[in-house]
Amino acid sequence: MRASIFENSKEFLPLNNYKRIFGLILLASFAVSLAYFAVTFQGMRIHFFQFAVFASALIFGPAAGFATGLVAAIPSAIATHNYWILGGNAILGACVAIYARKISIPLAVVAAFLTQLPYLVATDLIFGIPLAMLQSMVLLIFAEDLVCGLFAWKAKDKLRQMLE
């Protein structure tokens, strides 16, 4: 069956065997590894850890997305001393899975970003990030989420097959 932009994800794999638990641990570890890998473009660091956060959320559900998002954000939180990042990525991971139950995965990624956005803006303003920089960061994070979400959407079925 070919994936459609309008296809939603109604079922998640339960963590009921060692293979699946190990799969989730691998995805979380991959997310942390990807957090250290960034491409610098015009002074902005572009991250790809959201791929593993979205993949775990789409395969295992909201709790896995929350946990993977939380763990994946640890390197960024430590590097910037902005521990608010942990909550934002946890919200993002959980919301993708929640929304993917009802709407298509690409739209779920956008909806999860929009759900995370008020938290992101409020906490970054509290942290003292200038508004001009915050605007650029929001656009970059949206682009990262969209690209990583599309890759996770395409990889989800193959990864899920390996875990069944």
Image (tube, helix red, strand yellow):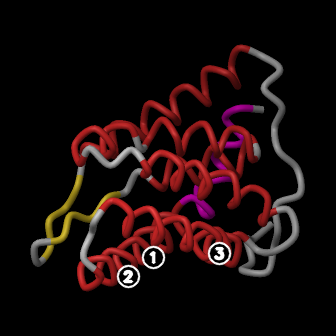
Q: Which residues are magenta?
A: 152-163
Identify the residue at the far left of this view.
Answer: 43
107 relative to 100 in the view: left or right: left
Could you tell me if the residues under marks 2 and 1 are in contact, i.e. CB atoms within 8 Å?
Answer: yes
Residue 37 is situated, as x and y percent measured from the top left of the image, at 24, 48
Who's the residue at 48% across and 69% down the image?
Answer: 122
Determine the secondary structure under disc 2.
helix
Q: Position of residue 76 (x, y in %)?
A: 31, 46
Q: How many marks?
A: 3
Residue, disc 2:
139
Label 3 – label 2 distance at C-alpha: 17 Å
Q: Of helix, strand and loop, which mostly describes the magenta segment?
A: helix
Query: Disc number at residue 86?
Result: none
Q: Amino acid at mark 3?
A: Pro
Judged from the image, the secondary structure of the residue bearing numbered disc 1 is helix
Q: Amino acid at mark 1?
A: Phe
Residue bearing mark 1: 142
Looking at the image, tell me whether mark 3 or mark 2 is earlier in sequence order: 3
User: Which of the two discs, 3 and 2, sits closer to the camera?
Assistant: 2
Image marks 3 and 1: residues in contact by CB distance under 8 Å: no
In the rendered image, residue 94, in percent from the top left (x then y), is placed at 69, 51
Q: What residue did someone put label 3 on?
A: 106
Dot 3 alpha-carbon crowd within 10 angstroms: few under 14, some 14 to 19, many 20 or more: many
Please report the residue visible at 42 percent of the width from the left and 51 percent of the height from the top.
85
Which-is-in-front pick, marks 3 and 1? 1
Toward the top, the furthest residue is: 18
Does 109 appear above or below 77?
A: below
| Number of residues whose C-alpha sits closer than 10 Å to that of mark 2, classed few (under 14), some (14–19) or many (20 or more) | few
Drawn side of residue 145 relative to residue 46, left or right: right
Which residue: 39% across, 77% down? 138
Within the magenta stretch, is there residue 102? no
